[in-house]
Image: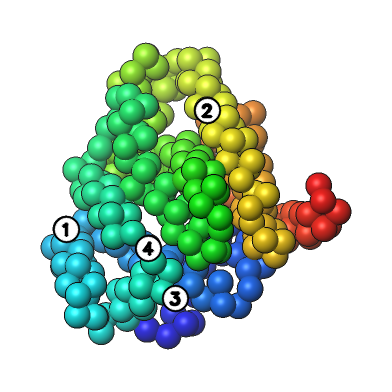
Amino acid sequence: MNTNYRTEIFKEGSKTYFNSSIFFSKEILKEVKILYAFVRIADNFVDSVPQQPEKFNEFVKEYRSGLKKGSDDPVIGPFIELVKKRNFEEKWAEAFFDSMRWDLSSPKMKTIDESLKYIYGSAEVIGLYMAKILELDERSYNYAKMLGRAMQYANFIRDIDEDNSFGRVYLPLEGSGFSNLQKDVTGYKPLKFRMFVQNEIRRFLHWQTEAEKGFKFIPYRSRIAVRTASDMYKWSMKKIYDDPFVIYDRKVKPSKARIYVAAICNALKIGLGQ
C-alpha cells in the first residue's frame, strides 16, 4: 500500500482530522497516516454492512503474528514497524481490538462507566499513540487520553442517528428517560432530548477543557494541528447544543475553509504565546 492510498483512507475517514493534520511536519504526518490506516481498516470491518467479523479476526491474528515475525500486509506491516520505532505498548492495540469487537455486538450503553470502558480502547489509546509519535513528555499522557476521550464523545453525540442504524447506543441512557435514541422516540419528548444532549455536550466540554491543559507539552507546529482539530470539535458541538435535533438531519462538520482559517488563527495565537 503506498502513501497515496493511506492518504485516501485518512481523508475519507475523517475530514476534520485530515484537514487539520496537514500542519504536522512531513515525517509526523507520515506516521499519523500509518496509525490512522491501521485503526480505520479494523474499524471498517466492524462498521461495514454486513459486518465482517471473520476479516476482523484475521486482521487481529495477522497483527499478533506480525509482532513476532513481521508482516507483509500493507496496513499491518508499516504499523508494526511504527510500534517498534515509537515503542508503543502492546496492550494499547489489544484494548483497541476489544472495543472494536464490542461493536460487533451492537452495544447499548447504560452507564457512563460502560461508555468509558469502550472509549479507552477506541480513543484514549489513540491519544497515547499520538503522544508517542509527537515524542511528548510522559506528563502529557493523561491529557492525551482525555483529548481522545472528549473527541470520541463528541463523535457519539454527532453520530447518534448513524449509530441508530447499527443498533448501537454509545451515550449512557441510565436516567435519561429514553429506551433508545431513535427519532420516533426522542421526538415525543423534545425538551427532554434537548436537555439530554446538552448535558452530554457539557460533559464533553469538561473533558475537552481538561485535555487542553496538556497542549503546552506539544511543539509549536504540531500544536497548530491538534488545537485546530480541538477547536473544530467544539464548533460542531456548539451547533448541536443550539439545535440537538439537527443530528437527525445531517452530520455537523466544519468546512475545509473554516478549518484552514482556524489553523491560521491558531498559528498566530500560539506564536504570540496565547
What x and y, as percent, mark residue 181? 37, 28
Q: Residues within 10 Å of mark 3 (few under 14, many from 20)?
A: many
Task: Compute the Cα span from label 4 to label 3.
Answer: 20 Å
First in sequence, mark 1 or 3: give its number.
3
4 w.r.t. 170: above or below: below
What x and y, as percent, mark residue 252? 57, 45
- Looking at numbered disc 2 in the image, what kind of residue is underneath it? Arg
Q: Residues within 10 Å of mark 4 (few under 14, many from 20)?
A: some
What is the residue that sits farthest to the front in this orientation? Answer: 138
Q: Residue at x 49, y 43 (%)?
A: 142
Task: Compute the Cα span from label 4 to label 2.
Answer: 29 Å
**Quarter holding residue 37:** bottom left
Q: Point out which mark residue 88 bears.
A: 4
Secondary structure found at label 2: helix
First in sequence, mark 1 or 4: give its number.
1
Mark closer to the observer (4, 3): 4
What is the residue that sits farthest to the right in this orientation? Answer: 272
Mark closer to the observer (2, 1): 2
First in sequence, mark 3 or 2: give its number.
3
What x and y, as percent, mark residue 33? 47, 71
**Quarter holding residue 74:** bottom left
Q: What residue would you read off at disc 1?
A: 53
171 w.r.t. 90: above or below: above
First in sequence, mark 2 or 1: give its number.
1
Of 100 and 108, the residue lying toward us: 100
- Looking at numbered disc 3 in the image, what kind of residue is underneath it? Arg
Q: What residue would you read off at disc 2?
A: 203
First in sequence, mark 4 or 2: give its number.
4
Task: Compute the Cα span from label 3 to label 2.
Answer: 33 Å
Secondary structure found at label 4: loop
Mark closer to the observer (1, 4): 4
- Looking at numbered disc 4 in the image, what kind of residue is underneath it? Phe
